[in-house]
Image (spheres, rainbow, N blue to C red):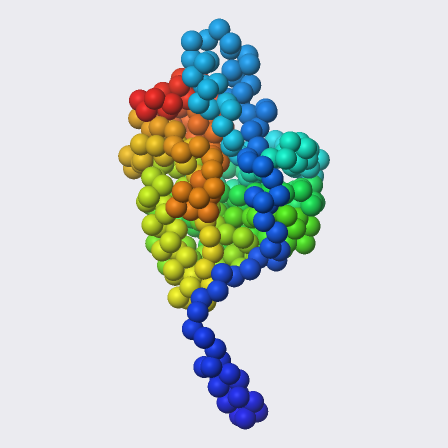
Amino acid sequence: MRHRLRTLLASLVALPLTLAVAPAAHAADPTTMTNGFYVDPDSSAKRWVAANRTDGRAPAVDASLANTPMARWFGSWSGAIGTAAGAYAGAADQSDKLPVLVAYNIYNRDYCGGHSAGGAASPSAYASWIAQFAGGIANRPAVVILEPDSLGDYGCMTQAQIDQREGMLTGALAEFGRQSPHTWVYLDAGNPGWESPATMAQRLHEAGLPQAHGFSLNVSNYFTTAENTAYGNAVSSELGTRYGYTKPFVVDTSRNGNGSNGQWCNPSGRRIGTPTRTGGGAEMLLWIKTPGESDGNCGVGAGSSAGQFLPEAAYKMIYGY
């Protein structure tokens, strides 16, 4: 036994000291299988423009928002999730475009914040839902943002609840790895104003990050691309130091053109950011949150509900006031 241990240690010492990018369960690149990003034909911005052609704000919303590729969010409102995800990924595939989908239905979603509370009825219900989500996408190329805020939302949770949440995320990643070989899944990592890079690296790793393609930042928030890039690189560095691998990341730039004023819930004076593209300091810059959709009953969206499209907020965000 001692001889085998000495042999093992000697072989480890002999390995080159380089960091590897941890592979996900699949390695297909959906960006090379498609020709650009998919524009959601049924986004809230497109629906509003179609219903309000004579509104003076409609031309700006149409030109600056409605035709920019952005994510579609899926949750309990989506009906039969396998059918819904499959139809969306299938429509994008028919257009030879890459769709971005957000899975937003984890059990005890937004447990501490409350504005977007809800989600699956139980961990087992979530496991079934996410399995159908992955199965709906199947072999089509796609990008999935997995459960925004789920790893930053720990402030009021017990350790048992945290363990349960991380287990659900690990299970979700396993389903995508098994059923969706051409999907890049990004496990959400909050934003630069939430947790330290070391803390977030630990949470990502414990939630199964080695099975994911990477992690996502700034979803529905306002921090600049430069701030997110610095934070993402710091998180990746912590992953390398602690666990011996790094991961790429994407940044939500939909509302970060003016940066953050420290408020997250419908703050005034924000502006749209760089439209969806590859590169730009991260692996991709994506419009994950739809500009103009409310964060909840707060700020300039007082009286609205989370996800409701507010044309005046959208119009002001185009011009930054």
Query: In the rendered view of the protein, which quadrant contains the C terminus?
Result: top left
Residue closer to the observer: 176 or 229: 229
How many badges with numbers are in the image? 0
Q: Is residue 73 left or right of residue 137?
A: left
Query: In the rendered view of the protein, which quadrant contains the N terminus?
Result: bottom right
Asked if residue 120 can be seen in this view, the reply is no
Residue 97 vertical placement versus 182 (above, below): above
Q: Is residue 26 left or right of residue 68?
A: right
Q: Residue at x 42, y 46 (%)?
A: 282
Residue closer to the observer: 101 or 62: 62
Residue 317 position in % (x across, y down): 37, 24
Residue 88 vertical placement versus 193 (above, below): above
**Residue with the most extreme top position:** 54
- Residue 47 is drawn in which quadrant? top right
Residue 306 vertical placement versus 147 (above, below): above
Residue closer to the observer: 172 or 67: 67
Asked if residue 242 can be seen in this view, the reply is yes
- Residue 43 is drawn in which quadrant? top right
Residue 232 position in % (x across, y down): 39, 51
Residue 229 position in % (x across, y down): 37, 47
Residue 13 vertical placement versus 111 (above, below): below
Q: Is residue 26 left or right of residue 280?
A: right
Residue 180 position in % (x across, y down): 66, 48
Residue closer to the observer: 305 or 134: 134
Q: Residue at x 48, y 18 (%)?
A: 62
Q: Residue at x 51, y 9 (%)?
A: 53
